[in-house]
Each structure stands twice: as structure tokens, then as C-alpha cells.
Amino acid sequence: MRKFRSQDVRTHSAGNDLFEESVLSTASFVDSTGRTAGLGIAAPVEDTRGLTSAQQAIAEWSAQLRTRRVLLADPGRLCPVDNSCREAVHNAAQSFAKMGDTVLWVGPASSMEQTLAQPYAQVETVHQARSLQVSNPTRLSFVLQPCTSVENALAILKVLRERFPRLRGQHPDQWCYRQSDRWDSVRSVARTCDLLLIVGDASTEEERDVKRAVVGATCRVEVLAHPAELQCSWLFGAATVGIVPAVSCPSGAVPRLVDVLAGLGPVSVLHQQTSTTVVSGAFVGEGRRRRSMIQPRAAYDARSSGWLPAHAS
């Protein structure tokens, strides 16, 4: 603790500048660059309760000083429904509609399905897939709503294909993998951190989705809308802190939260990112070239040896 006068430090309270003798309680450390950093709380000398509270707060927070890793879960991969994504879905749906099919829109509802003149149905859940009724089961096609989680879509499509074997649909090359990549990133961070902080509005559906996505992870999961809501008790034993910026995350909240953590010890900030890239065509073409080099006699000998199926050519 250090005693100082108004000439040294100006404190601010209730909109007024107070110039009085105060006591500053501090805790500090030296970061990886050799710079001194830390935290401090000042209280007027006459304020006995304030001095006690300041000393207790510094003691509690200084107990959490340590070097930490901070993992940011894919901050740049929040799924925007851009023109290319919408165009691919719209073109596929229009193509199926022109053939007279009822188009099934798989995933969370949007306004895109309303642009079709042909009949359509919205299938958002596995339950809806099981109860879906259509006029002609042989004339069905599907498209994935933009930014639908592929994992959720596959569960729905499995039920639909079991019920409607002639179902056809949008080519997987045209699916949007951004949402799936983001969930993979969140799960990866949750598996390797001690504390997972979801930055955003705790009352939104997305925050509940994040919590469901990390079910089974051993880390502690907390939601905060602002860095000021960070609790000292959350950091106990947290050598690695994961941060998930939600769609409702206020602008600048994540950098400010990282700054707060940096005030509690040296930090190493890492972006944990998963990215899916479509590469179909490269391997397919290579396979065709290699197969064309097999001579008929060689295929016959291979078949007779038992390791090539009889229908192979």
C-alpha cells in the first residue's frame, strides 16, 4: 500500500474530482517484455470501510496473478449470409422447383423459401422430418438453409432419406460449412481450456446453443455481457481461458476482456480456427486417370486372384 496526496493522483467519484489524501493498494508483476503491469485501488484515508474493501479486493484478485493462455474461438468466422451463399441455395432450389419437385428447406427458417412459386416445406428439426407429410413422395428435393450447421442437417437428412428413398438434393459442394467450422472451433477451445467465457447476452438462443455444444467438456462455462462482469472466483486454477464471441457480443468487448486478463498476469493470445475447404474434383479426376491405365488382362488376373470384385472393370 502507498499513501499519496491529491497532487499525485486525481480520483473521480459521482462526477466530481476529489482532491484528498488517499491510500493506494496495488499488486504488480513483470510481463514477458519486461514491462511492469498490475492493478490498484485507491480509497480516502478517512474512509475506513473503503480502505478495508480495497485491501480485500486487491488480495483476492492478486491471488489470481499468473501466466495464462487465452484461446479465442474463431472470432472471424461468425456466419454472415453473404450473396454467394444465398445465390447457391437459391439457384439449387429454383432448379428443383422447375422440375416440379416440392422443395424441402432444411435448417432454421429464413425468408428465402418464400421466393419459390412451387410448393415447399420447412424442416428445422428431426421431429419435423419424422412427421412430414407430402403429396408426392417421389417428387422431393432438398436444399440447406444458408449457414445451417451441417451436423444438424445430416441428422435431419438421414430421417428424410429413410422415409423418402427417392429424395434428391443440393450437392454438398454447395453447402455452407461456416457454422459447422465455428462449432468445431468452440468445441476445440472447450476441450483445452479451464474456463470458457461466452461474451454476449445470456438470454439469447445462441448462448444456450454454445452451452449445448460443449456439453461433456470439463471446463467451467460462464456468460458475461461486459468485461466488468468477470468474477474473481471464475479464474481460480484457470491456466487457459477460452473466449467465445457470440453474435450479441458488444463491439470491442473481446479486446477489452483480453486486456483485463492481461492485467492479471502475462498472457499468450491464440486464435483457434477450423476451416473446411471443398476440394472435390482434384481427387476424383486423379482416380479416373489411374483407373483408365488398367488393361483388361490385368483386371482379369486381379479378379482371379480374389482381391478385385467380379463386377470391376
Image: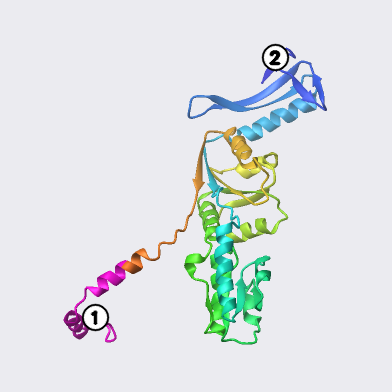
Mark 2–mark 1 distance (CA, rounded to whole Å): 86 Å
> Is residue 165 depicted above or below 26 in this figure?
below
What is the x, y in percent for residue 291? 26, 74
Is residue 268 toward the left or the right of residue 247 in the image?
left
Q: Secondary structure at mark 1?
A: loop
Q: Is residue 72 magenta?
A: no
Q: Nearer the viewer, residue 189 or 139?
A: 139
> Is residue 253 depicted above or below 87 in this figure?
above
What is the x, y in percent for residue 270? 50, 43
For the residue carrying disc 2, how many other residues have a C-alpha within 10 Å: few (<14), some (14-19), or many (20+)? few
For residue 253, what is the image quadrant?
top right
For residue 183, what is the image quadrant?
bottom right
Q: Secondary structure at mark 2?
A: loop
What is the x, y in percent for residue 101? 59, 81
For residue 230, what is the image quadrant?
top right
Residue with the mark numbered 2: 8
On residue 5, the disc is: none
Q: Is residue 300 magenta?
A: yes
For the residue carrying disc 1, how many other residues have a C-alpha within 10 Å: few (<14), some (14-19), or many (20+)? few
Find out whether the residues at labels 2 and 1 contact each other: C-beta distance under 8 Å. Answer: no
Residue with the mark numbered 1: 307
Q: Amino acid at mark 1?
A: Trp
Extreme-top residue of the structure: 7
Determine the residue positioned at 30% across, 72% down.
Answer: 288
Q: Nearer the viewer, residue 23 or 105?
A: 105
Q: Is residue 214 visible?
A: no
Q: Amino acid at mark 2?
A: Asp
Which range is magenta? 286-313
Can you tell which of label 2 and label 1 is closer to the viewer?
1
Q: Earlier in the sequence, mark 2 or mark 1?
A: 2
Work out which quarter of the rendered image holds the N terminus and state it.
top right
Q: How is the image coloured?
A: rainbow
